Image: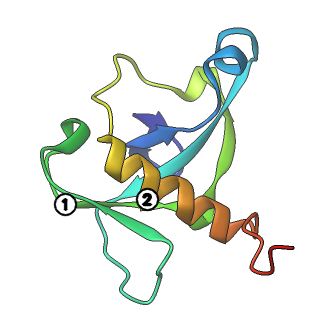
Amino acid sequence: MVRLDKKRPAIIISTEALNRYALDVCVVPVTGVEHRKFSLRVPISAGEAGLRSNSWAKCDQVTTIEKSLLLYPAIGSLSPATLRKVEESIKLALELIDDNPA
């Protein structure tokens, strides 16, 4: 959980090495509001990662926050399959995928 616009779940995406020493972390906010027109919002089923209701990772809103905004303890972890979907959506949002490989 993090304190952003309000208290909400978030996925920490920065590496453990950075998280250990840096004063901030990179996160993807999670929402309980579905936006069907946003293909970069990855669905997360209720029960996964400790979430109480169906939620969506807002991969179009990657942000960096100070560690002081993190609320402990962590509520859970994503499944490997969901984490892969989040990673791919972040790459699309940031145009890190080469559509024209050499």
Q: Earlier in the sequence, mark 1 or mark 2?
A: 1
Please provide percent x and percent y for residue 86: 47, 56
Residue carrying label 2: 85
Q: Position of residue 52 (x, y in %)?
A: 14, 46
Q: Where, by quadrant of the figure, is residue 64 drawn?
A: top right
Residue at label 1? 54
Q: Nearer the viewer, residue 42 or 32?
A: 42
Q: Are marks 1 and 2 in contact (CB under 8 Å)?
A: no
Q: Position of residue 6 (x, y in %)?
A: 45, 48
Q: Nearer the viewer, residue 10 or 69?
A: 10
* Circle 2 crowding by C-alpha within 10 Å: few under 14, some 14–19, many from 20: some
Image quarter (top left, top right, bottom left or bottom right) of the C terminus:
bottom right
Instruction: Please give the name of the residue rendered at 39% of the width and 65% of the height, measured from the top-left corner.
Output: 42
Left or right relative to 86: residue 50: left
Identify which amino acid the numbered label 2 is placed on. Answer: Lys
Q: Quadrant of the N terminus?
A: top left
Q: Residue at x 64, y 54 (%)?
A: 62
Q: Is residue 93 left or right of residue 55?
A: right
The residue lying at 67 percent from left, 36 percent from top is 65
- Pointer 1 local density, CA inside 10 Å: few below 14, some 14–19, many at least 20: some
Whole-number angstrom distance, CA of label 1 to CA of label 2: 16 Å
Amino acid identity at mark 1: Asn
Height in image: 24 above or below 40? above
Report the mark closest to the observer, 1 or 2: 2
